Image (cartoon, grey):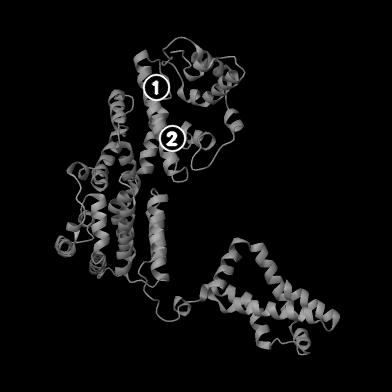
Amino acid sequence: MCMCHSICKIVELKQSTEHGQMLEKACESLCFLSESTFLKSLLYVGKHEDPTIYSQLVQKQQELVQKQQELESKLSQGYCISKENLECALNLVHLVDDMPKISLASCVSGPIPKQPLVCSLNANVAIEAVLNPASDIQASVGHLLLLKKLLNLSSAELYCEIIRACFMGLANSSNEDLKWPAFTFLKVPQLLLKIHSKRKDDRQWEEELEEGLRQLINYTPLLDLTDSKCHCDCLQYLLNELQKVELLSEAKAKALTLQRQANTMKGNLPRQDHQTATQAGATLILRAEPTVTSILKTLDSDYSKNQDGLLGILCHMITGKSFELILSAAAATGKLNSFVKKLIKFNEYNKQISGEATMNGQTRALLFDITFLMLCHIVQHYGIDSMMFSEETKDSFFTNWVPECLAEGGRYNCPEKMLSGCDSNKVDLLLAQFLSNDPDFKMSQVKWHEVCINVPMAIKEILVAWEHGAISTDNVQCPHGN
């Protein structure tokens, strides 16, 4: 745009020092862009993100090319712009369009210096472990292989840096955080297995993985600190998991263990008492992994025949840290979506009514309540986007309720939209039940999904009445008056 304006003014005014200087600076800037592979790459990305603006750039470039001869004759009259610079500036669009044809070798001038810490790879692993624990492992593999190519890492260095990043995460996380143990000991072996499956020549795979682990063992202070923080031998745990997926032979795992024992300086670190050591997050998460498989099989049973037994299992799951352990293990092993699907089906079944007795109504209410709260907890911790609702559950109550009514991850919903689906008659029934002196809440013949939909309006009415003094604070705090 600047070049076009300056050229028009030069042609119009015949001689213009100011516009000549502007034209010189514009040519210099475009030449600088033309010579930088990185900046041309950014323009290539911008070309696909905003085709409209890029098409305007192409149009201006074509206009300038058409005026090139006239422009060269004018520039020869005292302006310090060479023909080469002008051609370089006008050639920028062609260079951007040719970006896909550039080989990686041409972008790298000389060997890439080895860094003490591969920050980009470390950050990528941390994002996957902490922010995207339920993400698709295939996408993670693609990102890591791209970084390997861009950073010119050998396979052994890639494996070493991935595991090193995990151990740094373990050393820096709290004992209550289960994301790093789940990622390190459950997801990383599967991730390495996927990388292995993408290789065309796998004859050197085990040797490269072994070399990567030997490089890792050289970071003795990091491994000692991680073991002390996690109260377990983290490398040994990882080697065991790599053997389970047949990425490492038993003989090589033993050799690596001996090398680690020869290098360790753990004797200089403060000892942990036995009670604390038994609560190692890595140990707990590895024990939780087979439990996830068992729970998924249990949830496949006939809902109508064993409601009390399933209620007992679900109640046991939500005690203490059990539920967090199960979710972390399920997310790391790619089973979280299956778990969510089964909970949704279970929740959907228990919203139905089939001429039930009082005791059956209480069981159904508890089952609906527990599965509903479990699903809300999963969505709030792993995000709606990470929950891949299937065709089987797309019409369920929970799948349709979540986007409109549940706030998660800094995303808030419009209250008016939340209240738009309420039924005034059902809201009145809820208000009457909330404000009655009867301590027993009606359980049988209740459609609990309708209660969930209408409760927000009932709460709004109670708060408005409280604000105007129609009901007391005691009634707001305890609607049943108890």
| In this view, the mark in front (1 or 2) | 2
Name the mark on residue 25: none
Q: Is residue 106 left or right of residue 61?
A: left
Q: Position of residue 79 (x, y in %)?
A: 75, 87
Say if residue 424 shows up in the picture: yes
Label 2: which secondary element: helix
Task: Identify residue for label 2.
Answer: 376
Q: From this view, report whether residue 322 is shown above or below residue 424.
A: below
Q: From this view, report whether residue 1 is shown above or below residue 221.
A: below
Which residue is drawn at the image coordinates 21% and 61% (left, top)?
A: 248
Q: Is residue 456 left or right of residue 333?
A: right
Q: Position of residue 78 (x, y in %)?
A: 77, 89
Q: Position of residue 85 (x, y in %)?
A: 66, 84
Quadrant where the image shows the N terminus: bottom right
Quarter of the view holding residue 49: bottom right
The kind of residue on which mark 2 rests is Cys
Q: Is residue 88 left or right of residue 8?
A: left
Label 1: which secondary element: helix
Task: Identify residue for label 1.
Answer: 365
Q: From this view, report whether residue 395 is shown above or below residue 126.
A: above
Query: Separation of disc 1 and disc 2 at Cα?
Result: 16 Å
Q: Nearer the viewer, residue 320 or 338?
A: 320
Q: From this view, report whether residue 438 is shown above or below residue 154.
A: above
At label 1, counting other C-alpha atoms closer than 10 Å, the crowd grade (few under 14, some 14-19, many 20 or more) is many
The kind of residue on which mark 1 rests is Ala
Say if residue 138 shows up in the picture: no
Query: Which numbered disc, 1 or 2, marks the residue that appears first in the sequence?
Result: 1
